[in-house]
Amino acid sequence: MRQGTCCQCGLTTSIRSFYSLNGMTYCEPCVWKASRQAKESGLPSEYVSLTDNSICARCGVHNESSEFPLFGKHPVCPACVSLVSDWPYPQWLKLSMLGVAVLLLVALLTGRKYFHAGRAMYIGERLVEKGRYGEALPYLRQTLQVAPDSDKAVLLAAKAALLTGDVGTAQKVLHNHSGGHFEDGSDGSAQEVKGLWKRAIAALEKADQASKLEEQGNKRQEAAHMMQEAASMYPESYALAFAAQAYAADAALDRKDYDRFLTLAEMQWKTGPSLETAVELSHAAACKYAVTGDAPYREESQAMLAKAQSLAHGDPKKEARMQEFAERIRYFLDTRTFSTKAEYDQKFRGGQKSTQ
């Protein structure tokens, strides 16, 4: 049996009674003191127990002449090496281990989608916290495909949708989750989404009222004012802001404020180029030409008319509407004479109403 000697007190006994600290050998009482002193001095203070590699860890036999080789971290005599390395595990244990491996494989394969959903929600939540709602929404949709009953995922998705002006997605998400009922309706997140939803719905209801006023024809000023209120109530909605611009343009035309009409029409075309905004800009530029006679306005009106006709190409209904509009706008440019659609229809189309 190997012997050891404490470097502090000189105690000599079995090596297994000693500890090593910073390359020195200590008995147990001395190593505690040495460890405290090392820590106070800023030196490593962790110590490890020493082992007697001349004693087999399995059978306890002692080799007086040399140390046994290590099997793993433990000394093992030659007689025990073969037993340890070729240990005959019971059949039931082998089968159990195989069963556990199969279950783990199945769990990994079937649970993959849940891991993916959890990762998507984590990313979505971080993006919501940073105010990047549009980027967060696709990740949260992925989560809801796997976990549609998750209160947290539903609330995050509804919040992200509402704060990007996407009321339709928010409505779908909430409706599919027990009609918008949550396990803890008083939770701060649930209350926040409820407040956002009420604000969005109130704005849309006001926008609907504005639309009804606009249809009356003689209340465009009121309609424009009400639509602007709706857009201010729900500034996250691009659609309401765009509608407010369109209503304001119609109101400016009624007031014969052609500068404002043209400015708004140009803004509409820039932010949302379409057949409708091309027609509006062509009309606005024609109005400016009619009152000023400046050729650039005439050229702008004709250019936007051509753009509108190209956008209508291939759709018979749109092409028919554009043919009527083109006739009226060209007459407008040639004569510099203002006339409403109804007046033009009465004069040149036998009183038939134009659809444009």
Image (tube, rainbow, N blue to C red):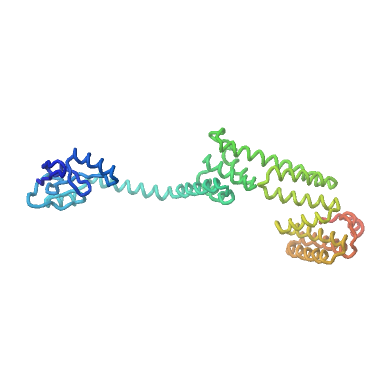
In the image, what residue occupies the spot 84% across and 67% down? 295
Give the image location of residue 103, x and y in percent: 36, 46
In the image, what residue occupies the spot 22% across and 42% down? 34
Give the image location of residue 335, x and y in percent: 90, 63
Image quarter hosting the N terminus: top left
Give the image location of residue 212, x and y in percent: 79, 44
- Comparing 227 with 328, the one in front is 227
Image quarter hosting the C terminus: bottom right
- Comparing 141 with 269, the one in front is 269
**Side of 178 where 302 appears, left or right:** right
Give the image location of residue 222, x and y in percent: 81, 44
Depicted 165 relative to depicted 301: above or below? above
Please indicate, yes or no, whether residue 58 appears anywhere in the rendered image.
Answer: yes
**Side of 272 where 91 appears, left or right:** left
**Side of 335 where 300 appears, left or right:** left
Spot the residue most to the front: 41
